[in-house]
Image (tube, rainbow, N blue to C red):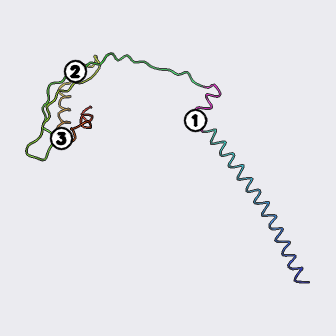
């Protein structure tokens, strides 16, 4: 009988431990559910605030303003003809012969005429640094738009 009573005592203590762990696990599960719900609601609220959904629902929208600029009709100003030797590692260097048209506003034509030498120098320097294969085809013509 002594063995049975010891076994019964162990069984009872094990059952008490299980009840305590069940209570702990239920509390932990409830805490996790409440925390997850709070996090989801907070994240949704923050997202809706930053996306502007709260403002539109509450009627807090600011009046939209727009600015209109009148730049005038653009003018094409032709620069003098250019003949430039392109960069190469061969004896016979390929060259490019072209006329450049600058598109700008009518107010800036006088400024371009005053600084035409500096502009031409910049264009020539840029073109001398280019290789022939970089200027051929659609990509090459797009590369020349600067």
- Assess whether residue 49 is covered by the magenta stretch: yes
Residue 132's disc is 3
Residue labelled with disc 2: 77
Residue nearest the observer in this picture, 94 or 53? 94
Q: Main secondary structure of the magenta part?
A: helix
Task: Mark 2 vs mark 3: give the one in front.
Answer: 3
Q: Residue at x 64, y 28 (%)?
A: 57
Q: Which quadrant holds residue 144?
A: top left
Packing grade of label 3 (10 A; few <14, some 14-19, many >=20) is some
Q: Residue 55's x, y, as percent?
A: 61, 29
Vertical arrangement, residue 40 with respect to residue 14, above or below: above
Q: Earlier in the sequence, mark 1 or mark 2?
A: 1
Residue in front for this viewpoint, 110 or 50: 50
Relative height, residue 10 to residue 71 (above, below): below
Which residue: 69% across, 45% down? 38
Q: Which residues are magenta?
A: 47-60
- Crowding near the residue tagged with mark 2, few <14, some 14–19, many ≥20 C-alpha atoms within 10 Å: some
Quadrant in which the N terminus is drawn: bottom right
Residue lying at the far front in this picture: please name it: 137
The residue tagged with tag 2: helix, strand or loop? strand
Distance of mark 2 from mark 3, alpha carbons? 26 Å
Which quarter of the rendered picture does the C terminus lie within? top left
The residue drawn where x is 33% and y is 15% is 72
Q: Position of residue 118 (x, y in %)?
A: 19, 28
The residue labelled by disc 1 is 50
Q: Residue furthest right?
A: 1
The kind of secondary structure element at disc 1 is helix
């Amino acid at each position: 009988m002594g063995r049975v009573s010891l076994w019964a005592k162990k069984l009872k203590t094990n059952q008490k431990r299980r009840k305590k762990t069940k209570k702990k696990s239920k509390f932990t599960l409830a805490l996790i559910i409440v925390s997850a719900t709070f996090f989801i609601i907070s994240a949704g609220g923050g997202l809706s605030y930053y996306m502007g959904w709260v403002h539109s629902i509450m009627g807090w929208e600011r009046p939209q303003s727009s600015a209109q600029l009148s730049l005038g009709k653009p003018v094409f100003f032709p620069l003098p003809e250019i003949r430039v030797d392109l960069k190469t590692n061969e004896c016979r260097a390929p060259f490019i012969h072209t006329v450049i048209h600058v598109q700008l506003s009518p107010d800036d034509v006088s400024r371009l005429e005053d600084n035409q030498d500096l502009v031409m120098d910049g264009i020539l320097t840029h073109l001398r640094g280019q290789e022939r294969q970089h200027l051929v085809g659609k990509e090459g013509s797009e590369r020349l738009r600067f």
